[in-house]
Image (tube, rainbow, N blue to C red):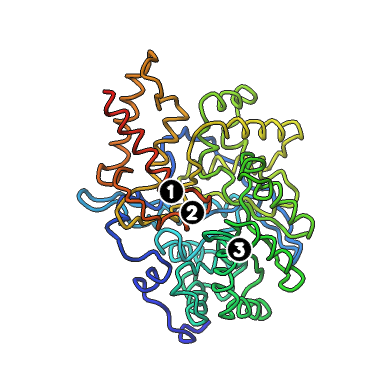
């Protein structure tokens, strides 16, 4: 690969083109690239040499059923007085976790130019380049979200920059990133055409596949189902090698108002065409690892030895058309627990699958915000920490610390837990009451959340609790 073949963006202009630059201080409220709970009980060591693999039908390459998502990488401690959003990736820990993953059989690593504020590909490239190229498969994306990146030249530069940052001469799995986004179905199709068709970028990527610079070409889907259906209708033309979809036991039936957005529909449409599925959000942004207490108790009673998260991972991996299941494993504890689940995978029975789907339906009755913590809505131009607000609200609902009636005996205790926890989780200047409803965040949400509406709802709820003190 010749670095002189294209003009590579410098980091600042590159992030700006992705829509991640600017308002850096506002993004300072994001805790870091990492999310999760460091205080989980440390699992026992997973076995070596027991990983379950699926065979890619195109090149017969074995792919680990557990894929490493490089979206939420560990970061170093932030010095006092420094904005938390400026935390640097802990490269030493990334290296250590990647080494451990490869040692235990993981060979699929998924990243993007947009992840970790544009730093994920670079960190991933450093960690993986220390291993033999045949030991790992790299998946990355053409994350051309911002209109500035919709030209042919910008798209080529972004792809070439991925090769440079990842320190490779070819990409194993290249995705058109998050197709289907838009204000409505017509806008979504217009944006897809602008991102990939009108500028000739999809033709360019097809040429790169012919040359072997891309081994497998596919797309990840979020948004309006019409775009998903259209791309699958063009399978004979483009010959998609894989498609990445969101699948978990909640989304199987409850992902949207109509059935066509549910994971059941998305998966079955791929099966019809013999297209391998790559699964994202098996834990629904961590929500299926932190179920409401009543639902978590049900799973623990069914199998006291299994973690709540392991049920969700087994569910996603049980489907035979799934090539790999991605997990953003920020901490070593997460990595070890997931390795135990997939080394080897014990597929769920039909009864267990249905039981989990019933749990998902019960979960849908909780009034939580369906946020997965992806941070695509960030940075907010007004400094609001959107994911942290939703995380705290959902956590309190799940744990019974979101009081509704002042007359209940536990009201005062629950009220205090919510308000004190809110101030500790989200600095006052980053809280929901500072949302002006500009709506810049909503079009970027893969879950189609009306973010300003939810922020105003939470703000009103917080004010109600304060008045009733």
Picture quarter containing residue 388? top left
Provide residue 450's location: percent of width, then percent of height. 47, 48
Provide residue 9's location: percent of width, then percent of height. 40, 77
Tag in front: 2 or 3: 2
Q: Given contact means CB atoms under 8 Å apart, are the residues at marks 1 and 2 in contact?
A: yes
- Report helix, strand or loop for mark 3: strand
Picture quarter containing residue 146? bottom left
Tag in front: 1 or 3: 1
Which of the marked residues, 2 or 3, is nearer the chain's N terminus? 3
* Residue matched to label 1: 451
Provide residue 404's location: percent of width, then percent of height. 41, 24
Tag in front: 1 or 2: 1
Does residue 343 appear to the left or right of 397 in the view shown?
A: right
Q: CA distance from mark 2 to mark 3?
A: 28 Å
Q: Where residue 137 is drawn, which disc sits there?
A: 3
Which of the marked residues, 1 or 2, is nearer the chain's N terminus? 2
Q: Nearer the viewer, residue 88 or 431?
A: 431
Is residue 54 shown above or below 423?
below
* Residue matched to label 2: 445
Does residue 249 appear to the left or right of 380 in the view shown?
A: right
Few, some or many C-alpha atoms within 10 Å of disc 1 (few <14, some 14-19, many ≥20)? many
- Report helix, strand or loop for mark 2: loop
Q: Residue at x 75, y 31 (%)?
A: 351
Q: Residue at x 64, y 56 (%)?
A: 225
Q: Given contact means CB atoms under 8 Å apart, are the residues at marks 2 and 3 in contact?
A: no
Q: Residue at x 35, y 55 (%)?
A: 380
Q: Is residue 288 visible?
A: yes
Q: CA distance from mark 1 to mark 2?
A: 8 Å
């Amino acid at each position: 690969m010749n670095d002189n073949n294209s003009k590579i963006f410098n980091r600042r202009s590159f992030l700006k083109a992705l829509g991640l630059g600017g308002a850096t201080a506002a993004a300072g409220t994001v805790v870091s690239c990492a999310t999760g709970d460091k205080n989980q009980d440390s699992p026992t060591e997973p076995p070596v040499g027991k990983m379950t693999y699926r065979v890619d039908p195109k090149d017969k390459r074995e792919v680990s059923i557990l894929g490493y998502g490089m979206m939420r990488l560990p970061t170093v401690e932030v010095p006092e007085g420094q904005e938390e959003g400026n935390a640097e990736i802990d490269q030493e820990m990334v290296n250590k976790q990647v080494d451990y993953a490869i040692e235990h059989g993981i060979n699929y690593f998924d990243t993007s130019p947009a992840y970790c504020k544009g730093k994920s590909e670079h960190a991933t490239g450093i960690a993986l380049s220390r291993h033999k190229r045949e030991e790992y498969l790299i998946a990355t994306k053409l994350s051309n979200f911002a209109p500035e990146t919709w030209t042919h030249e910008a798209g080529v530069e972004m792809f070439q920059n991925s090769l440079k940052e990842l320190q490779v001469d070819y990409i194993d799995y290249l995705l058109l990133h998050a197709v289907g986004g838009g204000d409505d179905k017509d806008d979504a199709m217009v944006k897809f055409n602008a991102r990939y068709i009108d500028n000739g970028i999809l033709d360019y990527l097809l040429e790169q596949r012919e040359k072997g610079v891309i081994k497998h070409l596919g797309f990840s889907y979020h948004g309006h189902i019409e775009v998903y259906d259209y791309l699958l209708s063009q399978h004979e033309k483009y010959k998609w090698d894989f498609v990445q979809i969101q699948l978990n036991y909640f989304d199987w039936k409850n992902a949207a108002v109509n059935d066509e957005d549910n994971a059941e529909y998305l998966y079955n449409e791929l099966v019809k065409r013999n297209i391998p599925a790559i699964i994202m959000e098996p834990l629904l942004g961590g929500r299926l690892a932190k179920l409401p207490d009543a639902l978590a108790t049900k799973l623990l009673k069914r199998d006291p030895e299994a973690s709540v998260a392991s049920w969700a991972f087994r569910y996603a991996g049980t489907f035979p058309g799934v090539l790999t299941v991605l997990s953003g494993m920020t901490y070593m504890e997460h990595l070890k627990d997931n390795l135990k689940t997939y080394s080897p995978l014990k597929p769920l029975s039909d009864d267990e699958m249905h039981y989990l789907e019933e749990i998902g339906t019960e979960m849908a009755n909780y009034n939580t915000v369906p946020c997965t913590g992806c941070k695509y809505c960030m940075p907010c131009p007004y400094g609001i920490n959107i994911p942290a607000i939703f995380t705290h609200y959902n956590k309190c609902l799940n744990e019974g610390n979101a009081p509704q009636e002042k007359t209940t005996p536990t009201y005062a205790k629950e009220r205090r837990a919510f308000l004190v926890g809110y101030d500790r989780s989200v600095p006052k200047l980053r809280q929901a009451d500072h949302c002006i409803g500009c709506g810049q965040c909503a079009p970027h949400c893969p879950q189609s959340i009306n973010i300003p509406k939810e922020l105003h709802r939470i703000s009103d709820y917080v004010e109600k609790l304060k008045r009733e003190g």
